[in-house]
Amino acid sequence: MTPRHKPLLIVVTGPTASGKSALAVDLALTLGCDIISADSRQIYRGIPIATAAPTREQLSAVRHHLVGILPLDAYYSASLFADQASALLPRLFASGGNRAIVCGGSMMYIDALTEGLDDLPTVSDEVRSSVLRLYNAGGLEAIRSELATLDPAYMERVDLSNPRRIIHAIEISLMAGRPYSELIGRKAAVERPYDIVRMAIGWSREQLFGRIAARTSAMMAEGLLDEARSVMHLRHLNALNTVGIKEALACLDGLMSPSEAEAKLARNTRVYAKKQLTWMRRYPDLYLLDPTAPLLPQALPLTL
């Protein structure tokens, strides 16, 4: 394929179980380029079933980046992803005919790379450690109380069952000396030296939920419970605060049967997929590909 004059970043996104990985691999094989994973959990080693990481066959077919490279106790963030992906892109454009693919459903990670992040202070190790100690000592109640003091406005809209978001807001408030809610929405200006095209497979909600049910069953059959058992001694880590691991650990704790865990996993995955679909509506330039038509090459939204 003829190299482009200006680099092109192809963003393959969409809700969980929509077929992003397979589409990205097909695209990469057609275009002769690499894939960067934009998934906040696939970055970690040891939980490929729970995170629906690319299969061995997919990893062998196309070179993937930022998949399974961190231990479960490593800190990671959208900012770190944007820095690492940006550092990779010049080399990947050079080897891939001025094309590269970013594939994932962690929309905040994709936005951090393509649109920039809110202009927030970098959190020091000291602050991060102190907030983590607060959480480990007092759990959700302790960090909720701290957030109520530091930023009551954000307290009213944050998901109070999501410790990661609460902790992040506390860290930024402490570093900035101002409420987190006063800082978000002020993005640093970014100018990307490449074109961007976004695409997703446009399943109906009924079709998507059917795919979620099928994948949930497959995860259980592939050994999700055994995978969770192998990391359950690390269950306090943020990397394991994720759909798939949480339900499996509850089953291993005897709180539900395997069939109940599978049903709950499917339900929680549907909830997560709905959130992803809501986020996707923010992209006016998103191409929705017809899942009933051949996706490659005829159905591509433009000449890549």
Image: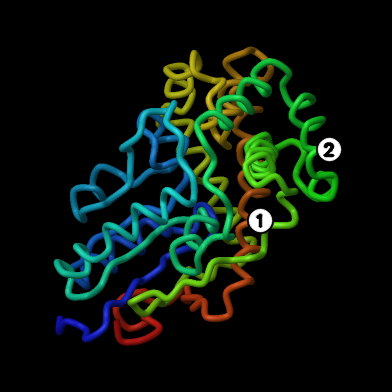
Within-10-Å neighbours for mark 1: few <14, some 14–19, many 20+: few
In this picture the colour scheme is rainbow
Picture coordinates of residue 128 (x, y %)? 56, 31
One can see residue 267 in this view: no
Look at the picture and state if 120 lies above or below 254.
below
Where, by quadrant of the figure, is residue 140 drawn? top right
Q: Which mark is residue 11?
A: none
Look at the picture and state if 44 lies above or below 189.
above
Picture coordinates of residue 133 (x, y %)? 62, 20
Look at the picture and state if 16 lies above or below 253.
below
| Residue displayed at 16% across by 69% down | 94
Pick the quarter of the image with the N terminus.
Answer: bottom left
Picture coordinates of residue 145 (x, y %)? 82, 30
| Residue displayed at 67% across by 23% down | 135
Where, by quadrant of the figure, is residue 91 drawn? bottom left
Q: Label 2 is placed on what type of residue? A: Ala
> Circle 2 sits on which residue?
148
Q: Label 1 is placed on what type of residue? A: Lys
> Circle 1 sits on which residue?
275
Picture coordinates of residue 27 (x, y %)? 29, 68
| Residue displayed at 64% across by 13% down | 254
- From the viewer's perspective, tell me whether residue 95 is left or right of residue 151: left
> Mark 2, mark 1: which one is toward the viewer?
2
- N-term mark: 2 or 1: 2
Q: Which element type, helix, strand or loop, lies under badge 2? A: helix
Q: Which element type, helix, strand or loop, lies under badge 1? A: helix
| Residue displayed at 54% across by 60% down | 117
Which residue is most to the front?
177
- From the viewer's perspective, tell me whether residue 203 is left or right of residue 98: right
